[in-house]
Image (cartoon, grey):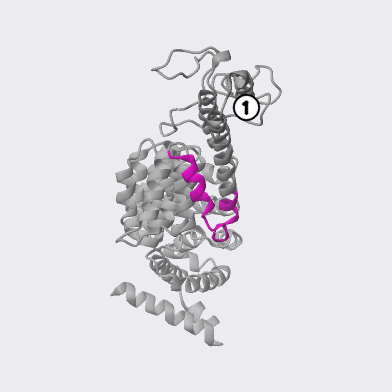
């Protein structure tokens, strides 16, 4: 009830500001801490998903800025007003206003140090901000600024000291639960945990965020961090755990998350993850499937390209309505069709050669043609497996520029990885080894196709993400 009353007072103040010429006197009658407290209450509503409060936040920030610029030393004799100045600054306030107001205040050295660090932070000087704020323990100052201080310090230390950053973000949440501070702390924790490879922390923070702040206007930033984290930690997070988290979302958000995971996983060659996410996006929830969505058709095709019948995949790709795809996905579709077409070309050529009637006099000609089609010197195809060293191992030691690298391997990459320089050619276990001169044209085509499939990740990796 008290929170509703304060929100009502803030709304009344804003209505007064919008329509009354005496707004200046009404604004001056309010103490800075009263204005900042109204701002915090509105921000908490925003964190809970009340997007209609965003214009109110903008207007209150304007009013607070004007009030802080007019504040004098007498105003800041009240500790709550100086703390309100700090909270205003750490809420995205004007650093010029914060610096000017702090210069007029007569307060303790620690509070002035916090103000100095906040101004450095707002002005994009992180090293100076860290150095100034480092000795100040957020748990030792009043909770109203301690929560914001912990959030700022945690954000600043995210790259240099991620372990300490996560501890600080936990403190921010402890000091200010259910607020925009906690929303921001959780959102940042998701990204830091993923970068650290901490799957347990990533899952916990993601679950907590979805449970409490899914409808925050800043949830799109969480979605970015969550999708990126799933890709980074795919070996450490079970698909069931991913499904548990997304099941807490509404169906449309869940679909979008799975589409994004499927796309990135397909480009990065994570076929199992891409297939899982594509299937989830295509299946939908409560029987509301998305089979007609061209994105699900594209990503599911990419995830099965190395295991399914390539002819069927090519046909499926051809039915996709490219007009409904973004430019990046159209590029991805073009790349996939090009790869599938190259994969099928030698198989069809070899099959035609095998099916054509032969006479003893023309056997040598047929064998020479088949060998020519499998020879990289005579065709625009990747070399057959075993015909060249591994791209990484083959890079010259003194080369002025590194050789192109293959797509990053993972446990989800198909087992048909390119053979090393000393690897034996792949042969069927039931057949005796053949010499290169006696190689069957069908075997040559299959061997060539295997290697071409290994190039899919490289080609798709060049498509825009």
Q: On screen, 256 above or below 67?
A: above
Residue 145 visible in the snapshot: no
> Which secondary structure class fits the magenta region best?
helix
> Residue drawn 49% across and 42% down?
311
| Left or right of residue 240: residue 154 | right
Q: Residue 377 appears at what percent x and percent y?
A: 68, 23
Task: State the residue in front, 360 or 302.
Answer: 360
Q: What is the total number of numbered labels drawn onto the structure image?
A: 1
Q: On screen, 56 above or below 106?
A: below
Q: Residue 11 appears at what percent x and percent y?
A: 43, 79
Q: Residue 433 appears at what percent x and percent y?
A: 47, 12
Sort mark 1 into few (<14), some (14-19) or many (20+) by Cα contacts within 10 Å.
Answer: many
> Residue drawn 28% across and 75% down?
1
**Is 318 within the magenta?**
yes
> Residue drawn 46% across and 52% down?
297
Say which residue label 1 marks: 373
| Left or right of residue 201: residue 89 | right
| Left or right of residue 157: residue 377 | right
Which residues fall within the magenta stretch?
308-331
């Amino acid at each position: 009830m008290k929170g509703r009353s304060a929100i009502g007072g803030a709304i009344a103040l804003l209505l007064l500001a919008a329509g009354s010429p005496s707004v200046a006197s009404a604004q001056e009658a309010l103490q800075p801490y009263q204005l900042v407290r109204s701002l915090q209450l509105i921000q908490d509503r925003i964190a809970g998903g009340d997007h209609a409060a965003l214009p109110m936040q903008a207007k209150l920030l304007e009013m607070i800025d004007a009030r802080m610029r007019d504040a004098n030393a007498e105003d800041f004799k009240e500790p709550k007003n100086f703390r309100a100045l700090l909270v205003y600054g750490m809420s995205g306030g004007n650093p010029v206003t914060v610096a000017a107001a702090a210069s007029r205040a007569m307060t303790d050295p620690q509070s002035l140090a916090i103000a100095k660090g906040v101004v450095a932070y707002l002005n994009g000087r992180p090293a100076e901000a860290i150095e100034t704020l480092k000795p100040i323990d957020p748990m030792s100052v009043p909770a109203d600024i301690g929560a914001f201080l912990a959030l700022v310090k945690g954000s600043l230390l995210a790259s240099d000291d991620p372990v300490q950053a996560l501890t600080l973000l936990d403190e921010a949440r402890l000091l200010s639960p259910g607020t925009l501070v906690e929303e921001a702390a959780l959102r940042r924790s998701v990204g830091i945990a993923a970068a650290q490879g901490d799957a347990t922390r990533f899952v916990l923070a993601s679950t907590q965020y979805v449970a409490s702040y899914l409808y925050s206007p800043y949830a799109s930033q969480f979605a970015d961090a969550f999708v990126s984290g799933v890709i980074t930690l795919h070996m450490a997070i079970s698909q069931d755990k991913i499904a548990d988290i997304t099941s807490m979302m509404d169906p449309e958000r869940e679909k979008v998350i799975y589409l994004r995971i499927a796309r990135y996983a397909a480009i990065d060659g994570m076929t199992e993850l891409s297939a899982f996410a594509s299937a989830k996006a295509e299946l939908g929830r409560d029987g509301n499937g998305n089979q007609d969505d061209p994105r699900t058709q594209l990503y599911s095709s990419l995830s099965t390209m190395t295991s399914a019948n390539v002819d069927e995949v090519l046909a499926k790709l051809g039915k996709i309505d490219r007009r409904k795809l973004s430019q990046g996905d159209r590029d991805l579709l073009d790349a996939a069709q090009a790869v599938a077409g190259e994969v099928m070309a030698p198989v069809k050529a070899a099959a035609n050669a095998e099916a054509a009637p032969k006479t003893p006099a023309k056997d040598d000609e047929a064998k020479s043609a088949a060998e020519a089609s499998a020879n990289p010197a005579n065709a625009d195809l990747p070399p057959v497996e075993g015909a060249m060293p591994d791209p990484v191992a083959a890079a010259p030691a003194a080369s002025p520029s590194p050789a192109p690298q293959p797509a990053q391997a993972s446990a989800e990459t198909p087992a048909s990885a390119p053979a090393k320089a000393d690897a034996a050619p792949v042969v069927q276990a039931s057949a005796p080894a053949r010499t290169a001169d006696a190689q069957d044209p069908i075997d040559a085509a299959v061997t060539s196709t295997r290697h071409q499939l290994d190039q899919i990740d490289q080609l798709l990796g060049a498509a825009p993400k």
